[in-house]
Amino acid sequence: NRRIVLANRPTGQPDENTLRLETTSVPEPGPDEMLVRTVYLSLDPYMRGRMNDAKSYAEPVPIGGVMTAQVVGQVVKSNIEGYEVGEYVLNTSGWQDFAVSDGTQVVKLGKSPDNPSWSLGILGMPGYTAYAGLLKIGEPKAGETVVVAAAAGPVGATVGQIAKLKGCRVVGIAGGSEKCAHVVKNLGFDACLDHRSDDLAAQLREACPSGIDVYFENVGGKVLYAVLPLLNPFARVPVCGIVSWYNLPGLPDGPDMGPAIMGTILRMKVRMQGFIIFDNFGADVYQEFVRDMTAWLKNGSISYKEHMVEGLENAPEAFNQLLAGGNFGKMVVKVG
Ligand code: NDP
């Protein structure tokens, strides 16, 4: 049984001292427990926060603890009634090959689900984040302009596609021409801009001639500063993530943008709301999501892309790639 534990809390980008691969014996399930083998491991930007010992919505991973993650696994031994060997489950057992579970926080996925790994992406946490954050906080209306960055990733790509279904003009922002081409051609956004270009602010102004009504915040940084002067009165800003700052050990260099941000919120009467997907919305919203997303995937109105990496041992490198934009689609590690 291999597992990846947090060896040291990183300052800045995680390096070779941050995580450690350990080998232990495969655990034995006791009475009313089962043994689950990881098949797919989800890598998500929030995991960078769990490496820090800071006040947050969740406890940090302790030093020596297995890195947190959702996984899709298969039951290999079961002493729990209702769980059969071979069936797929969604589990929260983290970066490891095997884990014993008593069924707490486990979701059954059946014996032969069509796309088991999608429960980590479009039909799981990132898809639900895009759906609830956009529709319940962003409240987009037909004809409005919606802007979202990390537009080729699972959250951003889904936000933009749902906004198109709601009749909005959608402008994506992504890293590089290949991602931008995908976002426009395959996902149907009206435009997509490269956040690395020097004149991002001017390009965004041109792409949003009627200003911005909904800015779905995934990244912070330069993108946020380009968006600020374009926000319309009563714009909505669901604050989902600020990935461009996750590796920042302190405050960024450059001018203090606090007054510009607060001034815009005040003068433009902007409603900015942070959310953590499993804390903000009730079971009714989750059921709406499952119903709508299943239908959209079936009728082809939403498309979904994964970036699959082979091997648990490659997870640390893949995680750094994810934070730096090296992924093209939902980052998943195939472990089994
Ligand atoms: P992605 O797969 O989209 O990965 C993150 C992407 O961020 C990278 O691929 C990269 O794309 C982009 N990025 C990195 N640095 C920068 C930068 N400096 N400027 C602009 N873009 C950058 O991740 P997810 O779709 O899983 O998550 C998107 C956001 O949603 C994250 O902030 C995440 O933390 C947040 N989130 C929040 C949840 C909540 O409950 N609040 C739940 C789930 C996700 P590119 O190559 O295009 O630059």
Image (cartoon, rainbow, N blue to C red):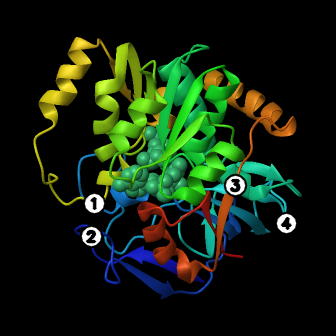
Secondary structure type for disc 2: loop
Q: Nearer the viewer, mark 3 or mark 1?
A: 3
**Image quarter for residue 85?**
bottom right
Give the CA distance from mark 4 to mark 2.
Answer: 37 Å
Do we see residue 275 in this rendering? Answer: no
Are the residues tagged 4 and 2 within 8 Å (C-beta)?
no
- Bin the neighbour count of mark 3 within 10 Å (Cα to Cα): few under 14, some 14-19, many 20 and up: some
Give the CA distance from mark 3 to mark 4.
Answer: 26 Å
Q: Is residue 211 left or right of residue 25?
A: left
Which is nearer the N-term, disc 3 or disc 4? 4
Are the residues tagged 3 and 4 within 8 Å (C-beta)?
no
Q: Nearer the viewer, mark 3 or mark 4?
A: 3
Q: Is residue 319 left or right of residue 332?
A: left
Amino acid of disc 4: Gly
Q: Which residue is mark 3?
A: 305
- Bin the neighbour count of mark 2 within 10 Å (Cα to Cα): few under 14, some 14-19, many 20 and up: many
Secondary structure type for disc 4: loop
Secondary structure type for disc 1: loop
- Bin the neighbour count of mark 4 within 10 Å (Cα to Cα): few under 14, some 14-19, many 20 and up: some
Which is nearer the N-term, disc 3 or disc 1? 1
Does residue 322 sit above or below 314 in this rendering? Answer: above
Q: Which residue is mark 2?
A: 9
Nearer to the camera, 304 or 224:
224
Q: Which residue is mark 4?
A: 86
